[in-house]
């Protein structure tokens, strides 16, 4: 299981945030405390509830582009592959 490290790293890369600021931003968007970001049990539940994908494929849980779309929506960021998917499927 993974925590929120990938989400925090995405905010650091896309918005140039320092790690503390990125953790606080992600925790706020996920409506959890910053300490809970590293708890694999809590993060597994949060990822499932919000459709952010999981490491282990589970039937009915968001995967691939669907999970990335949900990440982009929840964190209020653009993700290139999501934008390309939207562009290509509208035509």
Image (tube, rainbow, N blue to C red):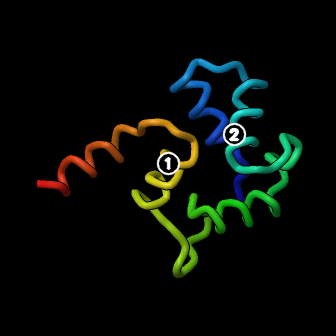
Q: Residue furthest right?
A: 35
Figure quadrant of residue 45: bottom right
Q: Residue at x 35, y 38 (%)?
A: 80
Q: Which residue lies furthest to the bottom in this view?
A: 59
- Upstream in sequence: badge 1 or badge 2: 2
Q: Position of residue 50 (x, y in %)?
A: 61, 62
Which residue carries the number 1 mark? 73
Is residue 41 toward the left or the right of residue 44 in the image?
Answer: right
Question: Can you say whether 25 is above or below 59 in the image?
Answer: above
Question: Can you say whether 16 is above or below 48 in the image?
Answer: above
Question: Can you say whether 24 is above or below 32 in the image?
Answer: above
Q: Which residue is drawn at 55% across and 23% down?
A: 15
Q: Which residue lies furthest to the left in this view?
A: 91
Q: Which residue is drawn at 75% across and 42% down?
A: 27
Figure quadrant of residue 49: bottom right
Which residue carries the number 2 mark? 26
Q: Circle 1 sits in a helix, a strand or a loop, which is it?
A: helix
Is residue 39 toward the left or the right of residue 88 in the image?
Answer: right
Q: Residue at x 57, y 41 (%)?
A: 75
Q: Where is residue 74 in the image (x, y as percent from the top left)?
A: 56, 48
CA separation, marks 1 and 2? Answer: 12 Å
Figure quadrant of residue 41: bottom right
């Amino acid at each position: 299981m993974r925590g929120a490290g990938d989400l925090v790293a995405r905010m650091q890369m896309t918005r140039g945030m320092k790690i503390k600021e990125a953790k606080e931003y992600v925790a706020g968007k996920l409506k959890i405390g910053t300490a809970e970001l590293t708890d694999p049990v809590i993060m597994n539940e949060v990822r499932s509830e919000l459709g952010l994908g999981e490491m282990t494929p589970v039937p009915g849980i968001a995967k691939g582009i669907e999970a990335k779309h949900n990440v982009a929506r929840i964190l209020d960021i653009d993700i290139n592959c999501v934008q390309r998917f939207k562009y290509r499927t509208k035509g």
